[in-house]
Image (cartoon, grey):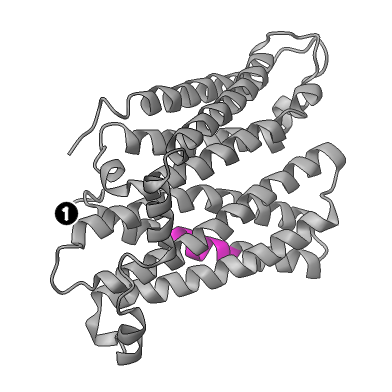
Amino acid sequence: MDLIPDTAPHWHILLTHFPSVGTVFGLGLFLASFYMKSEDLRRASLVIFVLMGLLVIPTYISGAATRWAIGNDPDVSLDLIAVHQDMALFAFIFVALTGCLSWFALWQYRRFSKPHPWNLIAILVLSVIAVFGLTQTGNLGGDINHAEIRSAEDVAAAAGQEGQGITAAIEESIISGAWAWPAMEAAHFMGMAVLFGVVIIITLRTLGVAKMIPFTAVHRLLPLGILGFFVNSVTGMLFFIADSGRYTAMTNSFYPKISLIMIGGVCLLYFTIFNRPWNLKQGDDGPVQAKVVAALTIALWGGVIIYGRLLPYLEGG
């Protein structure tokens, strides 16, 4: 028996449970933290939201890959897939936004001892909408392969949706717009430059460079790095939506790149909330664990850049 999935549908079935269950669990902890007045529970819920914001990326990508894998099956309705894909995009947006604001709240915990109330309210609203979107996405996904649970109303409502939904409209606007792709390329490169620049500053200080600067000073730069990450996530997903068939076939470059982004995002979370780097005062040398994470972070984000550059040259089947 194969323990590791080897097809897109199997990966999608596995991955889709994590953002769905994790976001619901995170929302439960978040609500419980207010009732119990527990900052520890609130921090835990924010960490979960951040992790789900990262995991929703490969979940969405595996869903698009599944569409290309099963699209030629005569028993599969492309109209239902289109409806499911549009709702998946809706859920993706709100899970990702919840993760971004949750990261910012964790940064505020370290910087100001507590996040701003507006941020917590926004996280609550976005997470509730995200749970709704994930629930609807799951229900629509079940209709695709299970004809026995489809209702006539669902089939009728989905009729004609292939090529007509929001996802298809985004794809068409990017492909038909002469300046859309070059503009996104420029924004993508600028976002990566900002992100990697912040990563280099944070990690080099942890590795012992510029010891005269306390870590609290470079910690202020993290929101700028996350802004670069956000710009890259938006433009990257637009690239993917516009040409998902080609990207999902890039098994030698695109999937390794996404994997490195996931792990690199967790490393950024380490520098946001953990005590070891934060406690580096002026003149202090970083502890071994922090140095290991710093070196790993440079390698991971360097790998993201390398694989991104090699995308046109390492296309796989």
Range of magenta residues: 18-25
In which quadrant will I find the N terminus?
Answer: bottom left
- Residue closer to the observer: 52 or 309: 309
Residue 274 shows in this picture: no
**Front position in the image: 27 or 290:** 27
- The image shows residue 65 at horizontal and vertical percentages of 28, 52
Q: Quadrant of residue 122?
A: bottom right
Q: In the picture, residue 312 is in which quadrant?
A: top left
Q: Which amino acid is tagged 1?
A: Met
Q: Residue at the location (32% across, 55% down)?
A: 64
Residue visible at 34% across and 79% down? Answer: 158
Magenta highlight on residue 22: yes
The residue where tag 1 is placed is 1
211 lies above or below 75: above
Q: Position of residue 249 (x, y in %)?
A: 24, 42
| Residue 22 x %, y % | 53, 61
